[in-house]
Amino acid sequence: MATKQRTRYLVMAAVTCSAIALVVSFLALAVSISSGYQAAPGTEQPKITDWMQAWGSIAGVITGLLAALAAGFLFWHERQKAHEAQVQTDEDRREAALNAARAVGCSSAQIEEHDDHATVTVSVHNHGPSPVSMVKAVVAVAARGKYILPTVYFLPPGVHEPLVGRYESGPGRSGWSDLVTLYFTDASQRTWRKTGHGEPERWEGPCPSLEDAEGAVRRA
């Protein structure tokens, strides 16, 4: 942004210097022609008032052109400033939305295996300034597929919410899994996906469900 401002100021300075140089050149040309002009034999030498009227007309045309050039440049300058302000506003909004998404996270998944089922628990939290909704957690387990936990439909700021699911499973080992992916929608109806402690990313596709997730472990 500072580089663009410096460039605009340099352009403005160049235009101003060019205008001044043009005016000085015009005055020098006027003085040179007026002082060196000799009327044809038998005709009257032009008076100073004649020269002033003639050069004044030409100066008026040049001044009008310079004024039009200056007005066009100022218009372009203001358009550029407005465009850059809008770009900066959009960047600030995107950064604010990303920071809010970063504030949503979860714990590792606790998996408790029993003889005929497994219980999976994930604690989700929202440390951001705005509520989020439709929070879904997907836990990936090697050789088992994915556990898709029940949805939290609304998660206010400053709230921790446990997600607990009960699923069909054969005998296995209890433990923890860090392979947890969250899907959630922010207050501006943007959907995000976040895996573990990684960066959130905008998500445009459908959110997972037990019915359409490939390899999902069925709920008991």
Image (cartoon, helix red, strand yellow):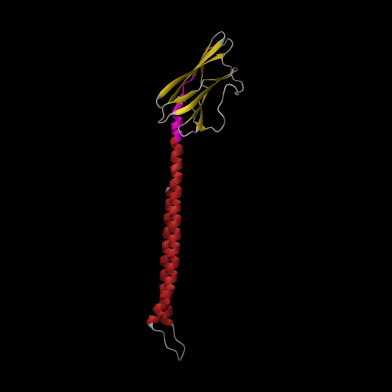
On screen, residue 212 versus residue 75, left or right, reads: right
Query: Which residue does the image show at 44% across and 74% down from the upper left?
Result: 58
Query: Which residue does the image show at 39% across and 78% down from the upper left?
Result: 52
181 in magenta:
no
In the picture, residue 37 is in which quadrant?
bottom left
Query: Which residue does the image show at 44% across and 24% down from the upper left?
Result: 125
Question: In the displayed image of the protein, which residue is found farthest to the bottom?
Answer: 42
The one nearer the camera, 8 or 36, is 8
Determine if residue 18 is in view: no
Q: Quadrant of the C terminus?
A: top right
Q: Indicate the position of residue 145 as horizontal and vertical percent values.
A: 59, 19
On screen, residue 50 versus residue 217, left or right, reads: left
Q: Indicate the position of residue 5 as horizontal and vertical percent values.
A: 42, 51
Determine if residue 133 is in view: yes
Q: How many marks?
A: 0
The one nearer the camera, 166 or 44, is 166
Question: In the displayed image of the protein, which residue is found farthest to the left?
Answer: 49
Q: Indicate the position of residue 108 as horizontal and vertical percent values.
A: 48, 20
Range drawn in magenta: 97-108
Query: Which residue does the image show at 44% across and 50% down from the upper left?
Result: 82
Q: Indicate the position of residue 208 as horizontal and vertical percent values.
A: 56, 25
Question: In the displayed image of the protein, which residue is found farthest to the top?
Answer: 115
Question: In the displayed image of the protein, which residue is found farthest to the right?
Answer: 214
104 in magenta:
yes
Q: Is residue 191 above or below residue 142?
A: below
Q: Is residue 144 above or below residue 197?
A: above
Q: Is residue 213 above or below residue 23?
A: above
